[in-house]
């Protein structure tokens, strides 16, 4: 006899997978929440004096990308156009997976970032945002003078 841990949600996952396969046959993608979200993939690297955020934004023009800081939140906004096409059925498309529209990604910044010196550059489909750190304050002794 084999003992198996009971998973009460296993049947729901199997049913969800079945519905995804059925809808795929009609040319509609998966209906799960994971497939509907469109997020900008990012990497964050910490160096001694700065943080570097790299965001993949292939195929966009630099004019289509906006970087802003509000309080301690860095937001990258972008919009991708569909090359002036009015319908997915035009121009002989059989499959169209490249997306168009607006999207954004926000990350919370640590207090050690100098907001006034943030710089960004866009090269080869990757946005690089450099976030310099505020130099750490070193403790200092204050001489007590005799009056």
Image (spheres, rainbow, N blue to C red):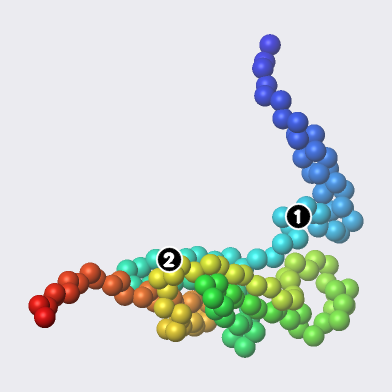
Quarter of the figure with the N terminus? top right
Quick check: 106 left or right of 45?
Answer: right
Quick check: 133 left or right of 107?
Answer: left
Q: Is residue 14 above or below residue 44?
A: above
Category of crowding for the residue at label 2, using alpha-carbon neighbours closer than 10 angstroms: few (below 14), some (14–19), many (at least 20) = few
Q: Residue at x 73, y 71 (%)?
A: 99
Q: Name the residue beneath numbered marker 1.
A: 33
Quick check: 53 left or right of 137?
Answer: right
Q: Residue at x 55, y 67 (%)?
A: 107
Q: How far from the left and from the top, in percent, is residue 50?
A: 38, 73
Q: Residue at x 72, y 70 (%)?
A: 98
Closer to us: 111 or 126: 111
Q: CA distance from mark 2 to mark 1?
A: 29 Å
Quarter of the figure with the C terminus? bottom left
Closer to us: 2 or 141: 141
Mark count: 2
Q: Is residue 31 above or below residue 9?
A: below
Q: How far from the left and from the top, in percent, is residue 72?
A: 52, 72
Q: Residue at x 45, y 67 (%)?
A: 110
Local secondary structure at mark 1: helix
Q: Is residue 47 above or below residue 117?
A: above
Q: Which mark is residue 19?
A: none
Category of crowding for the residue at label 1, using alpha-carbon neighbours closer than 10 angstroms: few (below 14), some (14–19), many (at least 20) = few
Residue at the extreme front: 147
Q: Name the residue beneath numbered marker 2.
A: 45
Closer to us: 123 or 51: 51
């Amino acid at each position: 006899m084999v003992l198996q841990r009971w998973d009460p949600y296993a049947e729901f996952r199997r049913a969800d997978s079945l519905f995804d396969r059925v809808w795929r046959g009609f040319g509609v993608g998966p209906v799960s929440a994971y497939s509907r979200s469109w997020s900008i993939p990012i990497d964050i690297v910490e160096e001694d004096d700065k943080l570097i955020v790299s965001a993949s934004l292939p195929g966009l023009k630099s004019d289509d990308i906006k970087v802003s800081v509000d309080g301690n939140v860095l937001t990258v906004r972008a919009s991708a156009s569909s090359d002036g096409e009015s319908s997915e059925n035009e121009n002989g498309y059989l499959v169209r997976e490249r997306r168009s529209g607006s999207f954004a990604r926000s990350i919370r910044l640590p207090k050690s970032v100098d907001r006034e010196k943030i710089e960004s550059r866009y090269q080869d489909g990757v946005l690089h945002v450099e976030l310099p750190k505020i130099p750490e304050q070193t403790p200092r002794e204050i001489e007590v003078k005799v009056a």
